[in-house]
Image (cartoon, rainbow, N blue to C red):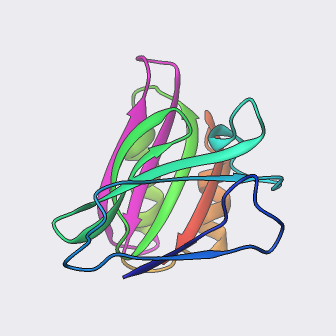
Amino acid sequence: MGIKCQFSGQKAGTCFLLDGSPENPFEFIQVQIANVESKFAIAISDSSEIKVEGKVKDKKPHLTKVGSFSVDVSMDGSLILCSQVDQPGMTGSVGNILGKENVNGSFISVGRNAPRKQAVMTIGVDEEPSKESLKRIEEILPAEEFVFLKL
């Protein structure tokens, strides 16, 4: 398995290929990407770097942190990441939108630092949601922003 990363402090265009092997497996990786405009501002640090962390779990890559929020997300399939204010009904509302479009969800995980404060909701999906579904998710309050990742 190879993971491409661009580390802050390196020249633009510099890319490293990290290759985990059975003899030298990865247990943890932290990536910081600088000077990037992001639609997912919650992952940007005070120094304007996007911070995500991950690890290998059951021989599969997992996202373990987005910004300051702990998550446990398998990097298998496609993902929807939502930045939101934690409150009752958010996971159900998003699930209903996806269900009406016949988009099968594989998991929903919410990472938060405190109840009813800023949070990150991650939804694994088997199919790509329509643009209309994604627009309806975007319109839900307090869903502040979201990103669809096709892996």
Place residue 7 in its image quadrant: bottom right
82 within the magenta span: no
Q: Nearer the viewer, residue 108 or 4?
A: 4
Q: Nearer the viewer, residue 14 or 131?
A: 14
Tell me the magenta residue range.
101-125
The answer to whether residue 128 is visible is yes
Going 48% across and 59% down the picture, which residue do you hit? 97
Place residue 126 in its image quadrant: bottom left
User: In the rendered view, does 34 fall on the left or right side of 71?
Assistant: right
Place residue 27 in its image quadrant: bottom left
Going 74% across and 29% down the picture, which residue do you hit? 46
User: In the rendered view, does 57 fall on the left or right side of 63?
Assistant: left
Q: Residue furthest left?
A: 58
Return the x and y of residue 71 as percentages of the image width and height: 37, 44
Going 56% across and 39% down the picture, which residue do you hit? 67
Query: Dominant secondary structure of the magenta stretch?
Result: strand
Return the x and y of residue 84 as percentages of the image width and height: 57, 35
Q: Where 140 falls versus 56 (above or below)?
A: above
Q: Where 73 falls versus 11 (above or below)?
A: above
Going 33% across and 72% down the picture, which residue do you hit? 104
The answer to whether residue 89 is visible is no
Return the x and y of residue 112 as percentages of the image width and height: 43, 29
Return the x and y of residue 98 as percentages of the image width and height: 44, 64
Image quadrant for the N terminus?
Answer: bottom left
User: In the rendered view, does 119 fall on the left or right side of 55?
Assistant: right
Q: Residue furthest front?
A: 23
